[in-house]
Every structure is written in structure tokens, then in C-alpha cells.
Image: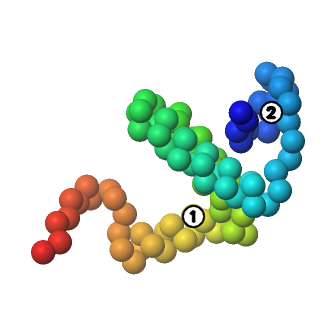
Amino acid sequence: MGKLVRDRIPELFGGQTRLLNGEEYRAALRAKLQEEVAEYLDSGEPEELADVLEVLRALADLHGLSPEELETLRRAKADARGSFAGRVWWTPT
């Protein structure tokens, strides 16, 4: 069973490859995001965050967003609603 991998993985480790069509790629990226987030949650290792970020950038690209445009969206949302730096836990009433 195959999975979406970084571009150089076949070059480094061999195996068979094929290119995904648009819909397959979108679905594979969504599955990869779940996989990478799970790996980070399991390990807590900061380098796993780099994998999460790589998948997020690929997903943003599917939406026509550059990394800079994604950062602009993130910043605008942080300006409007704040970030998570305050460590605020909220319970609605």
C-alpha cells in the first residue's frame, strides 16, 4: 500500500511511483496532515512540526496561496482574535 511522500524519498529509498491527479493529491494531503499531526502528538518532537508545516504549505498551494499569503491570513486572524501565546483556556457559559 502506498502513501504520499516527500519528492526525494523514491530517489533515496527506491520503490514504485506514480503521479496523483488533483483530487487524489488533495485527499492524500489531507490524510498526510492527519498522519503528521498524529506523529507529532505521539512523539512531541519539534522536527515533526516541520513535516506538519510542509503539508500545510502544500495544502495552501492547492488553494493558490503562497507561504507569504498564508502567513498574512494567519497574522490577520491573530490580529482579530489573538494567538495562543496567552495560554487561555476558555469555558463557555
The reply to whether residue 80 is in sight is yes
Residue 19: mark in rendering:
none
Which image quadrant is residue 26 in? Answer: bottom right
Mark 1, residue position: 71
Mark 2, residue position: 8
Residue reaching furthest to the front = 1
Q: Is residue 48 left or right of residue 41?
A: right
Which image quadrant is residue 27 in? Answer: bottom right
**SS at badge 2:** loop
Is 18 located above or below residue 61 in the figure? above
The amino acid type, in three-letter code, at marker 1 is Glu
Is 11 located above or below residue 49 in the figure? above
Residue reaching furthest to the top = 13
| Quadrant occupied by the C terminus | bottom left
The amino acid type, in three-letter code, at marker 2 is Arg
Q: Which numbered disc, 1 or 2, marks the residue that appears first in the sequence?
A: 2
| Quadrant occupied by the N terminus | top right
Pointers 1 and 2 in contact (CB under 8 A)?
no
* Front tag of 1 and 2: 2
Q: Is residue 20 left or right of residue 93?
A: right
What's the image's color scheme?
rainbow
